[in-house]
Image (tube, rainbow, N blue to C red):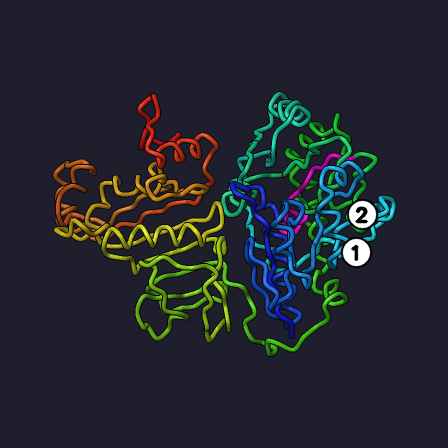
Amino acid sequence: MARFEICIVRPPRGRDSEAFREVAESLHYALLRLGHRSTIVENAFSSEVTSIVLGADLLRQPALERVPESAIVYNLEQITPERALDNPDYVELLQRRRVWDYSARNLHAYAALGAKVQAELLPVGYVPELTRIAAAPEQDIDVLFYGSLNERRIPVLEELADAGLRAKVVSAVYGPARDALIARAKLVLNLHFYAGNPFEIVRVSYLLANRKAVVSETSELAAPEDGLADAVRFAAREELTDACVELAYDTARRGALEERGYARFSKRRLEERLAALVGPATWPAPGSAARYPLRLRIGGGADSPVDRLDVDAGARPEADAVIDFGQPLALPLKLRTARFGSLPLYASMFDEIVARDVPGRSGEWDAAMANWLQLLKPGGSLRLTFAPEPGKHDAMPARAADGRSWVRYTDEFWRLGWSEYRFELVDRRYVLSPLGRRLQDAGRGLEEILREPRAVEEMTVSLRKVFLTDQEARLGAGMAGGSRPADGSAGRGV
């Protein structure tokens, strides 16, 4: 049994590093299936384990020197002479470390560049754990495109709207928020950023794993990978709109493509390919849970699904671990659990956090919200359920019902020193007490009822972790430095 840490490199404000998330999770699950121990970390390198580094091309000196000699660099970028000239330090790193590469074309490119890179081929592969997006009951998006925009992509996307298609275009959306859009979409468009791009297997593989129809631009360099020629509807750039119209309105043809794409890609089992590179191990025992928890529950509940970590602030017998979220957490935080063994908590670990055991005083709330923001993936959801406590004015639940308390964690993120992420308020729901229901029956409005002590028995607040926009980051930096915007917009969302 070997120990691996899959390290995602994320530069400051590097939101696009989330594009590596599904590859990291695939490696993680495949390693677990082989019996190895594995965790996912960000910007953390250790010589005590084998680090598998994703996004090492984003590193610059002196950070490159922190990559241990025992590390494996998994290259997911196209290797070209232009890229080598732009980033010679990365090419030098590839010559001094063990390298896995996703593309057979790159193996030939290294030799053509004269680079002495001993790369081993590891194509992007399938793990069952990433089949996790269920189609929405109503697919109200005909075509979804997610990615950066440029002069090459915009005209094609405008053509979709001109053809009468309900097209949804988003940028810098990852994790659960992106998955929710995928669930609502009939198909997803894969469009090259540059004319010479190869087939974007990293992006498309996640869609195929979730039975999503894909229309992809093809070109001389964008030939489909082995076994995937009919898994995707390929079309030349000028024919993409027609291909999208064809599939959006033909349910049977679209369904056949979804099933064929899944069938083709699911044969590319990653653990089989990975076994040739790292070998199998004998842990865990057959039949034991080797899943990596994607959800975190804090307080309450007796059931313990295999993909959820249960923690408590007190010694609840059925809890997996005891954590005081009212104090700042130093991540990664190593836990010892009966169900998951030794399990580190690290940044961007969970899709969802559900909390009932909430802190009491305001200072503890600030620490808890910062901890939960760290632990959630971008786009991940935080759902808090609690009873407002009248008379305790220093306690968050005493002030939460009117909604103003949450501004601190949404629009006024800068007060807490948050510089990359914040929360956005998604929803608030209330369970009224008998007093509250009497007031409602008497015709009192909700806002008036919420101001009445003991009118609310329980409330649930849903928030989502989002990246700061560039404008919000500048605003936050200015407010933290003591300056105020000229338009008086302090405290408002931008």
Q: Quadrant of the C terminus?
A: top left
Residue at left 66%, top 42%? 213
Q: Residues within 10 Å of mark 2 (few under 14, many from 20)?
A: some
Does the CB distance between marks 1 and 2 fall below 8 Å? yes
Q: Position of residue 323 (x, y in %)?
A: 36, 65
Answer left or right for 154 relative to 378: right
The dot on residue 214 is none
In percent of width and height, residue 340 lies at 50, 71
Q: Is residue 217 magenta?
A: yes
| Quadrant where the image shows the N terminus | bottom right
Find numbered disc 1 in the image and state the secondary structure of the residue it sits on.
strand
Residue depicted at 26% across the width and 40% down the height: 403
What's the residue type where badge 2 is placed?
Asn
Residue, disc 2:
106
Q: Give the range drawn in magenta.
A: 205-218
- Residue at 81 percent across and 41 percent down: it is 223
- Can you say whether 463 is above or below 33 in the image? above
Q: How far is the residue under mark 1 from the one under mark 2?
A: 9 Å
Judge from the rendering whether residue 464 lies leftward or rightward of residue 358; answer left or right: right
Q: Is residue 158 left or right of residue 377?
A: right
Picture quadrant of residue 88 = top right
Q: Which of 354 and 409 is in front in this view?
A: 409
Element type at mark 2: helix
Q: Label 1 belongs to which residue?
A: 119
